[in-house]
Amino acid sequence: MIRTATPDDAGDLVALLRAGALAPTEDDTDLTPYRAALADIAADPGTDVLVAVLDGRVVATCQLITIRHLQHGGGRCAELESMHVAPEVRGRGVGGVLVESAVDRARTAGCYRVQLTSNLARADAHRFYERHGFTPSHVGFKRLLDPGPA
């Protein structure tokens, strides 16, 4: 079953983020900021955190963000972020059901494209995305920011 995440899912989601991270940075000792983030996300009509539930347990997640572009005639585009599947259920089709559900939601929202980035070290993930119709087309860049003065 695919559904929207709720603040009650915070512990399961942080566990998935930690299990899927190349270098764990998520703090599972205080779920307050994650619950607050889920509440804020739920209030934003352009974004959704989806979860896959198997046997009553949250086993996968992704965040779908839709934005309006100036290009493509002012069309809508979707970004798929933070796709994580519990290691013990990988290869069982759960991730595929989740990603296709996210793509369907993007299509329903009127998006002309779904895009994502994936770490260069994740060759298995790249094969997964290609099996689901994604093509490598760009080089991604990121710049981490200092928090700056308060």
Image (cartoon, rainbow, N blue to C red):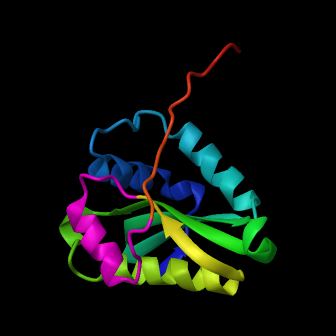
Residue at 55%, 44% (x, y): give it.
34
Q: Which residues are magenta?
A: 118-137
Residue at 43%, 68% (x, y): give it.
137
Compared to residue 13, the image places residue 100 above or below, namely below
Asked whether 85 or 120 is in front, the reply is 120
The picture quadrant where one finds residue 52 is bottom left
Residue 94 can be seen, yes or no: no
Position in image of residue 141 (x %, y %): 47, 45
User: Is residue 97 highlighted in magenta?
Assistant: no
Asked whether 135 or 129 is in front, the reply is 135
Compared to residue 31, the image places residue 11 above or below, namely below
Left or right: 114 as drawn, with respect to 66: left
Asked whether 116 or 60 is in front, the reply is 116
The picture quadrant where one finds residue 125 is bottom left
User: Is residue 120 highlighted in magenta?
Assistant: yes
Position in image of residue 107 (x %, y %): 63, 85
Residue 91 can be seen, yes or no: yes
Residue at 29%, 67% (x, y): give it.
126
